[in-house]
Image (cartoon, rainbow, N blue to C red):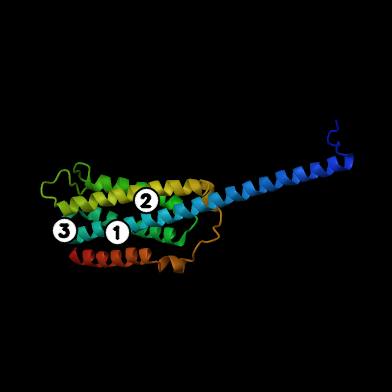
Amino acid sequence: MYGLPAPSGGQSWRVGIITVRAHRRDWNNDRVTAIDTAERAKTRSDATLLAAAALFTVAVLLHNSDHVRRGADAVNKDVFWAGTSSLFIEVAIVVLVCRRHRLAPLAATAGGFSLAAGYVLVHFLPARSWLSDSFTSASNVSPLSWMAASFEVIAAITLGVVGVVALRRHGGLASATRPVADQLSLRDGLTHPFALAMMIGNAAIFVISFAQL
């Protein structure tokens, strides 16, 4: 019987090189696939964060419009000025998200949950002498006010949750210090439709509310 000829030393050496190259090629392909998967996850999280910012914009404008409908004299001065101050935070978060800024996921997380807590503190806890426009202690709150305030809380929590997911997919807190290749300019962020709606809408609401004082 005749078997296959044993590979010579030179053949064994060439087979080893081919094997190493094949393993290296497979490793590089796996690495590229992992990078592509991570980038796609970041892109999806950025798109979801932008959608959450749009929902938040609608909720803020709806709730603030309801305040205009009720009249500035319907709330205490501390609530009025606290709400006015929060406008800057709300606008800043939306602008950062529209810019795809490296701080956007962190700002959405911290701002979303903090603002939601503030909305609950003012509207959904029993009445007290400071920062209170309690719906739970009042007897004549309209369904529109309940809906607007509840929607704003839900939208803020949604923004915070989506921000957490985006922050994780971008690499955690360290991602807030790393530059982002596709980050838009401040001008592009300010002229984004969602940012414009938030700024112009709240500016008009503020002017009307101030005139009601």
> In the figure, 83 relative to 12: above or below?
below
**Element type at mark 3:** helix
Label ID, residue 70: 3
The earlier-in-sequence mark between 3 and 2 is: 3
Q: Is residue 19 visible?
A: yes
Q: Residue at x 20, y 61 (%)?
A: 68
Q: Residue at x 42, y 61 (%)?
A: 98
Instruction: Give the amino acid type for the residue marked by disc 3 in the picture.
Output: Arg
Q: Locate the C terminus and report the quarter of the image it occupies.
A: bottom left
Instruction: Give the amino acid type for the residue marked by disc 2 in the picture.
Output: Leu
The reply to whether the C-beta atoms of the residues labelled 1 and 2 are less than 8 Å apart is: no
Q: Residue at x 41, y 67 (%)?
A: 190
Judge left or right: residue 150 versus residue 175: left
Instruction: Give the amino acid type for the residue marked by disc 1 in the picture.
Output: Val
Camera-nearest label, 3 or 1: 1
**Element type at mark 1:** helix
Q: Badge 1, how many Cα within 10 Å: few under 14, some, many 20+?
A: some
Judging by the rendered image, the residue that carries numbered circle 2 is 159
Q: Locate the N terminus and report the quarter of the image it occupies.
A: top right
Measure how far apart labels 3 and 2 are at the Cα level.
27 Å
**Element type at mark 2:** helix
Q: Badge 2, how many Cα within 10 Å: few under 14, some, many 20+?
A: many
Q: Nearer the viewer, residue 44 or 213?
A: 44
Outermost residue, left direction? 140
The earlier-in-sequence mark between 3 and 1 is: 1
Residue 183 is situated, as x and y percent measured from the top left of the image, at: 51, 61
